[in-house]
Amino acid sequence: MNQTIAIVDASVGETPAERNLTRSVDAETRVYKVSNGQFPPLPAGPDWQYDGVVISGSQTSVYDDLEWIHDLTSWVRDVHRADVPTLGICWGHQFLAQSLGGRVVDMGDHELGYRTVHRRGDDPLFAGIQSSFTAFQTHSDRVAELPAGAVELARNDYGVQAFRLGTRYGVQFHPEYDRETAEWVIGNKDLSDDRRASVLATMTDESVDAALEATNVFENFLGLVATHQRQPGKSD
């Protein structure tokens, strides 16, 4: 059965987010650039046609006082109440956590480069992914508290790397990034020479190849979407 996924692009300006997500999500997709005020319809409305939602990264912080972030918070709570499977990536992971009752804070640091993540448990989102795996990271905020009822699915030394609340999932890492995108991100960061060199040192052929394993998240998410029976109005 063909699936249709709404991609919520929260990035600002020209970024690789749309290219990466439409390439990674093997389904019919429609992209909404929410930072430009383009929003999907309400899940309970007559124009809703989506089986799931994917929320991208962003250069903003989820706690920034921006009108589109406030509007998106209201929308994603409707998505949660309607029991629509959702995958938030990096900023999207933090945004889901905050919108559904968790707390996000500034780390006072920046996790950047190819890093190791450790799974917890055997959630189907991580089927085919080793207990410790490599993924690209770029974030300076973290989820400090998960929403009530959420289950932590992965972690590293910077904190929570994945969680689930019903069929709402967040992953802090970027499974959609290829080497070109990683180089673009690093090239656009204001880094000291030493920090840039240390980050680039993580970008080996081995780490880039190893990170391909994390792309299983997308296939697994679509598998969850395919078997999910929505229960509108049900609180997870």
Image (tube, helix red, strand yellow):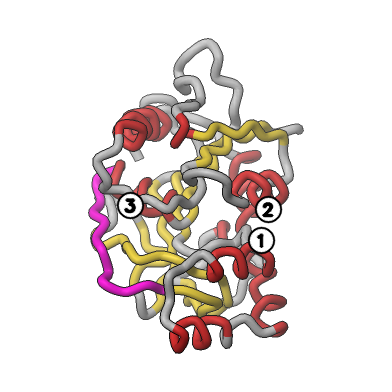
Give the percent coordinates (x, y) of residue 169.
46, 51
- The reply to whether the magenta stretch includes residue 102 is yes
Q: What is the quadrant of the N terminus in the image? A: top right
Q: Which residue is mark 1?
A: 216
Give the percent coordinates (x, y) of residue 80.
39, 34
Q: Nearer the viewer, residue 189 or 18?
A: 189
Q: Which residue is mark 3?
A: 61
Kind of residue indicated by mark 3: Ser
Q: What is the quadrant of the C terminus in the image? A: top left
Main secondary structure of the magenta stretch: strand
Kind of residue indicated by mark 2: Glu
Q: Which residues are magenta?
A: 100-111
Secondary structure state at the residue bearing disc 1: helix
Kind of residue indicated by mark 1: Asn
Q: Residue at x 30, y 60 (%)?
A: 143
Q: Residue at x 72, y 34 (%)?
A: 28
- Which circle marks residue 219 in the picture? 2
Q: Earlier in the sequence, mark 3 or mark 2?
A: 3
Left or right: where 2 falls relative to 59:
right
Q: Nearer the viewer, residue 185 or 143?
A: 185
Secondary structure state at the residue bearing disc 2: helix
Left or right: where 133 falls relative to 68:
right
From the viewer's perspective, is residue 161 above or below residue 226?
A: below
What is the distance, in whole Å, between disc 3 and disc 2 at their CAs? 28 Å
Residue 235 shows in this picture: no
Label 3 CA crowd tier, 10 Å (few <14, some 14–19, many 20+): some
Give the percent coordinates (x, y) of residue 92.
44, 49
Left or right: where 170 falls relative to 5:
left
What is the distance, in whole Å, between disc 3 and disc 1 at their CAs? 27 Å
- The reply to whether the magenta stretch includes residue 181 is no
